Image: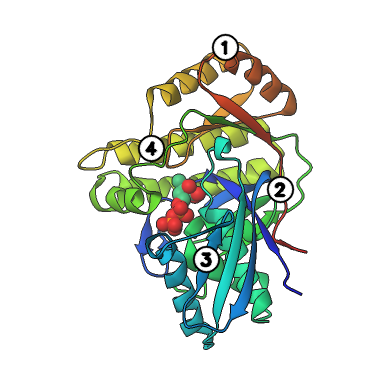
């Protein structure tokens, strides 16, 4: 029986933005995320009698160009674990295109878990996190549910995620606000590389992440949503400052992104507890309590051309 591996996507509250080793995807800093329940990837892998992998994404066969990143990943995995089998991979993204989440985190976490199952590698969660990280850095964190920290490390064996609190009892919701569904022009891989190489503020970013990681972990322990939100928003804005200070400068923000940032600042003035975080794209994620997110939604309904999806705290890897 082929088992399906399911991995949920995660949103970084302390962002991963920059690698010291491109090939192994070793980051310059730790990062910290929240796994979300609404968006996930289901993946199965079957051994096939062929010397080529066959990759299906959302029921359609990927051509050579589109499957390159996954095939490279499978080649590296074969080399690392010393097996030669090829696979038919079937991956379904339950990340509504309207949700504006990147699927590489849930995608590579589900793929790593699926290969582990099919090849009976019996990997520990730590080893699984490392294998997921080799595909996409943020995937290392999707092995666990709840709040998760990725420890930067400095080699392939000591860079992996650890759970901070997998089932936190906290009234925290994430509202995903989609302003644009088009594929981004500058991928996160390229964007972070440009930031590391050319932003004069990069060394400060490394220092900032180290202090904000300590602060947010304390806020999580205290279940202090205001503090978690303040730190997450400041960290996200600081990450985007690295793109604006790169040379040449670039930004993932679009006019609507900025409009929503302003709206959330105004709502805070009115006493609504809500904070923004933004990844390598124009879409905005708003953090708040169930009540404050309901309030934010009513204001967002007045904006044209935006769709919203609410997510709660999600699980780690599952098999069925
Ligand atoms: C802004 O994990 O997509 O979402 O390791 O190059 O595949 P690669 O990058 P990726 O970068 C995610 C960047 C981010 C922040 C985060 O998730 O921590």
User: Which is more toward the observer, 84 or 259?
Assistant: 84
The residue tagged 4 is: 240
User: Which is more toward the observer, 24 or 90?
Assistant: 90
The residue tagged 3 is: 55
Left or right: 128, with 179 as reference point: right
Which mark identifies residue 302? 1
In this view, the mark in front (2 or 4): 2
Q: CA distance from mark 4 to mark 1?
A: 26 Å
Judging from the image, what secondary structure is the residue with disc 2 in? loop
**Screen quadrant of the C terminus:** bottom right
User: Which is more toward the observer, 254 or 31?
Assistant: 254
Specify which label sits upstream in the sequence, 3 or 1. 3
Compared with residue 66, is residue 156 higher up or lower down, i.e. above or below?
Answer: below
Q: CA distance from mark 2 to mark 3?
A: 27 Å
Q: Residues within 10 Å of mark 2 (few under 14, many from 20)?
A: many
The residue tagged 2 is: 314
Judging from the image, what secondary structure is the residue with disc 1 in? loop
Judging from the image, what secondary structure is the residue with disc 4 in? helix
């Amino acid at each position: 029986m082929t088992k399906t591996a399911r991995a949920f996507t995660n949103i970084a509250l302390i962002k991963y933005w920059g690698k010291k080793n491109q090939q192994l995807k070793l980051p310059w800093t730790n990062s910290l995320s929240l796994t979300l329940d609404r968006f996930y990837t289901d993946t199965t892998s079957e051994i096939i009698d062929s010397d080529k992998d066959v990759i299906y994404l959302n029921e359609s066969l990927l051509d050579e160009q589109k499957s390159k990143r996954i095939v490279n990943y499978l080649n590296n995995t074969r080399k690392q674990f010393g097996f030669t089998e090829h696979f038919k991979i079937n991956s379904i993204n339950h990340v509504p295109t309207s949700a504006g989440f990147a699927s590489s985190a849930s995608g590579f976490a589900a793929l790593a878990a699926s290969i582990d199952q099919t090849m009976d590698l019996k990997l520990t969660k730590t080893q699984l996190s490392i294998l997921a990280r080799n595909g996409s850095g943020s995937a290392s964190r999707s092995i666990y549910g709840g709040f998760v920290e990725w420890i930067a490390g400095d080699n392939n064996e000591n860079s992996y995620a650890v759970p901070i609190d997998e089932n936190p009892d906290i009234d925290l919701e994430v509202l995903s606000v989609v302003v644009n569904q088009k594929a981004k022009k500058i991928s996160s891989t390229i964007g972070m590389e440009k930031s590391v190489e050319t932003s004069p503020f990069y060394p400060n970013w490394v220092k900032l992440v180290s202090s904000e990681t300590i602060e947010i972990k304390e806020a999580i322990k205290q279940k202090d949503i205001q503090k978690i939100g303040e730190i997450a928003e400041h960290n996200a804005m600081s990450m985007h400052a690295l793109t604006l200070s790169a040379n040449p400068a670039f930004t993932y923000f679009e006019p609507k992104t900025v409009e929503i940032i302003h709206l959330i600042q105004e709502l805070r003035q009115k006493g609504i507890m809500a904070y923004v975080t933004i990844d390598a794209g124009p879409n905005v994620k708003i953090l708040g309590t169930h009540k404050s997110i309901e309030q934010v939604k009513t204001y967002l309904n007045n904006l044209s051309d935006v769709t919203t999806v609410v997510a709660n705290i999600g699980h780690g890897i599952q098999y069925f």
